[in-house]
Amino acid sequence: MQHLLLLFFSIFFWTGATDKLQDETPWPDELNTAKGASYLNESEREVIFELNKVRSDPKRYSKEYLEDLYTAYKGKVFAYPGQESTLTKEGNGALMECIQVLRNTAPVPILNPAEGLAKASKLLVNDQQFGGIGHITRKGLTPQDRMEKYGEWNICSGEDITYGNFEARQIVISLLIDDGVPDRGHRNNILNPKSRYVGVSFGKHPSYRAMCVIDYAGDFKTK
């Protein structure tokens, strides 16, 4: 499933098997589970930190980072602070629905980084550095194929991709709002209580300038 929103779109794959805001209280350091993962760059570690923030306290994440974004919409045009405007499909209705969901969502376990999942996501980033979109590589590798190339997953697996986003919080917020995606599959991946491991790869894209791939698994053993 693919949804194009001018400079941004995101897609997800699932199988059952504002920066201007200042935090009143710092988020717990234990949420930064990837801080020692030397195989990830700073942006990739920050994405995992953001994912763990929202998983550990969805209500707080909504209050601190989403609620003030209501004024960033002018009709269906959304201007994320510091970024170029994008044309959305739903306008601020998707944001308000997301806020309501996060207010009523219980915390779920935080994610730990897995090097094999990071390699699986990196494989797709490298595959698309000269063009293309979607979860399948030019050689036909699915997300599960890529995960199994670098390890063994169990319980569940999923993949989110964003194109055109450059900052960790922007990436996660875009996936949470999930504009134009009726089943909110990206948000469901982020909040899936069965997931325990994650891999992230951030890179350049010839058409959208940037892309970020996030792979999730309920259990994962890196080869």
Image: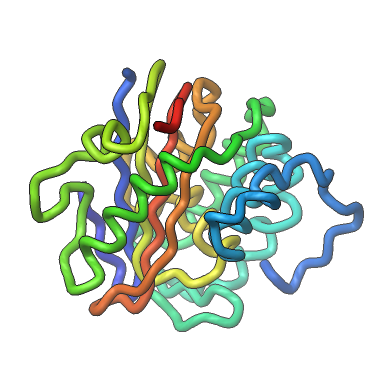
Residue closer to the observer: 54 or 181: 54
The residue sitting at the left extreme is: 139
Q: Is residue 87 visible?
A: no
Reply above or below: 83 against 122. Answer: below
Q: Residue shown at 83%/66% (left/top)?
A: 22
Residue closer to the observer: 130 or 12: 130
Residue closer to the observer: 25 or 37: 37
**Image x and y of residue 56, in percent:** 71, 35
Q: Is residue 31 visible?
A: yes
Q: Residue shown at 60%/35% (left/top)?
A: 111
14 with respect to 217 (left or right): left
The residue sitting at the front extreme is: 223
Q: Residue shown at 25%/79% (left/top)?
A: 206
The residue sitting at the right extreme is: 25
In the picture, the quarter occupied by the C terminus is top left
Colour convention of the picture:
rainbow
Reply above or below: 50 against 126. Answer: above
Residue 125 image-quadrant placement: bottom left
**Image x and y of residue 176, in percent:** 50, 48
**Image x and y of residue 121, in percent:** 36, 50
| Number of on-image labels | 0
50 with respect to 94 (left or right): right
90 with respect to 27 (left or right): left
**Image x and y of residue 41, in percent:** 56, 63
25 with respect to 116 (left or right): right
Q: Residue shown at 25%/57% (left/top)?
A: 3
